[in-house]
Structures are given as C-alpha cells and as structure tokens.
Image (tube, grey):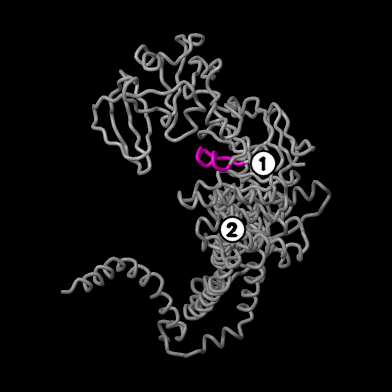
Amino acid sequence: MPRHYWNHINGWLLVLPAVFMIGLFTHYPIFSTIYHSLFSTGTPTRPSIFTGLENYSYLIEDDIFRKVLMNNIIYSMCTVPLSVAMALGMALLVNRSIVGRSLVRMSFFTPTVLPMIAVANIWLFFYTPEYGLFDQISQFFGGGAHNWLGNPNTVLYCLVVMVIWKEAGFFMVFYLAALQQLSPELHEAGKVEGSSNWYYFRRVTFPLLGPTTLFVTVNAIINSFKLVDHLVIMTKGGPDNASSLLLYYIYENAFSFWDTSYAATLTVVLVLILALVTIIQFAIVERRIHYQ
Amino acid sequence: MSAITLTDVCKSWDDFEALKNINFTCEEGKLLVLLGPSGCGKSTTLRLIAGLESPTSGSIRIGDRDVTNLPPVKRDISMVFQNYALFPHLNVAENILFGLKARKVNKAEQEKRLKDAAGILGLDIFLGRKPAQLSGGQRQRVALGRAIVAHVPVCLMDEPLSNLDAKLRQEMRQEIRSLQQRLGMTMVYVTHDQVEAMTIADKIILMKDGGIEQHGTPAELYNKPATAFTGNFIGNPPMNILKPTKEMLSLCNTMIPDSVRGEKLLIGVRPENIELREEDGCEVTVVATEYLGADTLITCRVKEQTFILSRQGRLVFSDGETIKVGWSLEHTHLFNSADGKRIELQGGGK
C-alpha cells in the first residue's frame, strides 16, 4: 500500500480513542437528548410516542421555566462579572510584594479547594435567621433578624455572594499565572515612559491578560449554568422557585417528577444557550484579543 | 543642562554589595559607555540613573537637579531596553507614541514627532505592524523611536544590540552613534562588548566587581590601561599579561629600566606589538597558528607561559617550530602584580 495511506490510517488510529470517548460521552448524549425531547415520557401503561414539538410548545408556556431562566440570567450577570473582576483585583494585589503575601494568596485560594457541598453548609449557617453569622453581627449593631434564604427577594443574591466567594479565588490563580508571565521590562518601560499605574493597567496589563479573561469568563458562564450543588443543600430552588436555576429545574423534572422527555427538552435549551455563549465569545471577542 | 553626575553611589542587596562608591560624570551631549563583564554592576548603575532602582547611599544629579529620589518619569530620560520592551499588542505607531499619550501631549504634536522619528529611522511603512511582524533590527528601531519622540536630553541604553546578529549590530551601532550626535543627546550606553564600546564611545567606564576600573577615552583605555584587567579586557585578541619569570625577563631583559625592575611585576604587551625578528629576538616555540584572513594569530610558548602575537597577512609556521620575537619598550606595559595597577615607565612609554 502506498505510504500516504498508512499515514492516514496511523493518524485515525491515533485519534480513535479520543473520538470514541468524546462521541460516547458528548456527541451521543446530545443527539439522544434531542431525540428524546421529541417524544412523550413513557410510563408502563402509556408507552412513549412521537409528539413532535409538543414539549417545546409546552416549554414556551411554562411559567416556571420562564422564571427559572430569568433567575439564571440574573445569577449569571451578577456572578460572572463580579467574580472575574474580583479575581483580577486579588491577583493584582498578591502579585505585588506585600507583607504576608503567601498567607493572603492561600486565604484567597482556600474557598476553591472546599467542596461545594461543604461551602453550602458553611454559608447555610452564615445565613441562618437569628443565630447565623450575619444575623449575630446585625443584632450586635442593633439590627433585627432576617430570613435571608426564606425571602424570595434576597435568596438569589445570597447565592450570588456565596458563589463569588467560592469562585473568585479559583479564577485568581489563572490571572496570577498570566501576570507572572508578563515581562517586568515592559513595566519598567512603562514607568520610564511616564505612564501612571492606571494608564499602564488599562493600556498594557489588561489587554495582555485578554486570553486569560476570555478563558476565565467562558468558564464562569458555564459554571453559572452548571453549578447546582448548593441549591440542593440550601434552598431546593425555593421559596416559590425564587432561587431555582435551569440545571436544577432539569434535575427536578428528570428525577423528582420523572418527566424525562420534558427534562430532555430543557436540556436542549441549556445546551443551545451554552453553545451560543461560547460561539459569541470565541468568534467575536477572540478577534480583538492579542495572543503572544 | 543634562550632564549626569554620580557621587559616592553605593548599592547593596542584603549583604551583597553590587556597587561600591561609584563616582563619575558624563558630560552633556557625550556618549558614555559602561563596559564590563557580566555581574560587574554596569546595568545596576544604569538602572540607578534611570530611577528603576534607588541607591543605598550617594547622590545622582542630572543637569542641575538632584534626581536621587525622583521616579523615572520626572528625570527627563528615555531608555532602550535589552529586549526592546515593546508592547506586543500595540502596533509600531502606538508603541512609539505610548509615552506621549501617557503624558497627554497634544495630538498634532504627537503626529509631528511620530512622523519625524519614523522618517529618521525608516519606519514609515511599518507603522501599522505589530512587533511580532518585525525583524530584530526593526524592533530595535521602534525602541529607538520611542526614545527619540520623548524629546528628552538623556537617553539610557541597556545592551541594546545584544540580541542582533553581528552584521546588523555593526550597522545599528553606527546608526545609534550618528543619531546621538545629530540630536545632541547625552547617552549612557551599557555593553559587555569591548568592540562596541571602542567604536561608539566618547568616554568609556570599565567596571569590575562593582567598582570603576578605568574611566577614559577609548584611546586612553587602549594605549594606557590603568590596570592589567583593563589591558586584558580591551582589545581583541586581548593583551598578553605575562609573569616576569626568569625566561620572560630574559626575553625583554634589555628593555625594562632598572628603576622598576623587581619581582612584583606583570608585563603586558599587545599581540599586535610583538614583532618577529631575525637576529636580536628571543627564541620561542610556536604552539598554534590561526589564520583569520587579514591577520594571523600565532600562539607561542616560553616555558610554562603562552602568549599570542598577531601579524598582518598570512604566515605559515608548523607547530613546534622555533621563532624569534621581541617588542619595543614603548609597547611594554608594566603592572603591579599585587593590585594590578599600572606602573609608569619613567621617561618611557606613551
């Protein structure tokens, strides 16, 4: 056989394990989900039948879905920019030579290594009415008791605060790594050229951190749709779905209500949202980012 | 007024003394080269002048101002870094104008200075490119452009040519020299390359172990090295520094005046000053010959000591051959072997 055929066969053999794994765990589930979303949920007495887009028309009229989607949008819009901005600020802080730098770095990073379940339990105590940490502080200064997690107006923002606390330290590590890659000579040139710290940050540091910002932002957005562990511990989506997020709603439909077809339909929506966000970020934002 | 004066400047990190009592003046409009092997403190000196480090003690003046405690931006200096320090995400024009924008110089003035600098450096067609799309020499020019548009009287250069290939280095050093003279800049230039120093400098300061070894014109350093180290560092191939053993003394016995004859001597002689002689020379053994095109380097041995002599043209000797050599008194440099300091020959030498 001619040599270049062997090259092709070799190449395919080499990628085969990866293709198999990605196919099995990524592509097959997506197509299977789309397929199942076009059928009704089968029961022992009423087998699953093809219903076309019926699940989707139900979804459009589903008030809870709309509420949950809106919750998730608010949740993402709060957690993503705030955790990324805090991560950058913390990285800038611990990249300088400050007193107790190792200790500060460690304390910023600690929330990341805790399991989400543990974090949720800690914060559940913080938010507990009357004898929780926040209420104790508030009562010390003469404030009243608050049912932070029981109030539909505050519950989502309580989760936002907790997730930022958990995530910012993780993103900080990426920023810190990127900052340490920047040549100190550039900063010296900036100083000689008379740039103020803010000017230098705006014109040089931040643009050069562009690839990191993109990576971190994509991850933050995906996480904001993906992390639901804390809901299971803290609120179960309540009160009145005020803290429910898309993935938790999918979980409820699939494993509490056993409406697997509708859960599949919701999953298709989630995948579409995430795919859209990623495409926008990589196609549009990436063109404006400088890679070294 | 832009003369640079360092007075009793010391710099140390913990218990490491990087600079010990540095005193010198770089006159206005002149090009001063800080020369020395790596670790000698030349870059530290430059960074002190720039304000990127502050001295442990001593004072630094630029013109009539004491700048010892001023940040770099207030010192009216520009600086070219070894790796150019170009901002990789900005194009050439933005890189050159970075400092002017930071200092909020008005747009029309920015445009004018950019046009001038680009014209001088031949960068007009590259203004829209990113540093990654430029060759080493072009990047070097961009870094120079940034120094030019600042319109400041003092320019500091930290090994600016060390990343370029030999041919380009020669071109660029001529360019830097003519630029410095045309714009009347006071320039302090750090290098470890003595050829670069010799060709470009008005004055050279040769440094060693955090101290100044010699401060003078290139000709002074070459013809009257103040120490054996200077003699050995300046010139290519370097000056031969020989121990006055019995054999070596006999080699030049007739030439060392009685007044300084002694045991604590080092004899320095440049390879190009050693002559091949027919009759009155001393016999030495050829160890190796290297033909360089214009010159031939001949390594010779007398007992345990070897030295190099260089002659123009092509000379052929076989290894182990015995030849006769000698040199005249005016080309003999004597150094004290204890501290390496030069010993003046009374009534002789240049």
Residue designated by label 2 = A209
Q: Quadrant of residue B3?
A: top right
From where the camera sits, is residue B132 visible? yes
Range shown magenta? B189-200
- Camera-side mark, 2 or 1: 1
Instruction: Please tell me which residue is depicted at 70% across the width and 49% down the height of the picture.
Output: A133
Q: Quadrant of residue B188?
A: top right
Q: What label sits on residue A91 in the rendered view?
A: none
Q: Position of residue B135 (x, y in %)?
A: 50, 59
Q: Position of residue B184 (x, y in %)?
A: 70, 48
Instruction: Please tell me which residue is depicted at 34% across the width and 21% down the height of the picture.
Output: B281
Secondary structure state at the residue bearing disc 2: loop
Residue type pointed to by label 1: Lys
Q: Judge the density around disc 2: few (<14), some (14-19), many (≥20) Cα neighbours within 10 Å.
A: many
Residue designated by label 1 = B30
Q: Is residue B341 left or right of residue B77?
A: left
In the image, residue B68 sits, relative to residue A136, either above or below, namely above
In the image, A146 versus B84, the foreground residue is B84
In the image, B108 versus B235, the foreground residue is B235
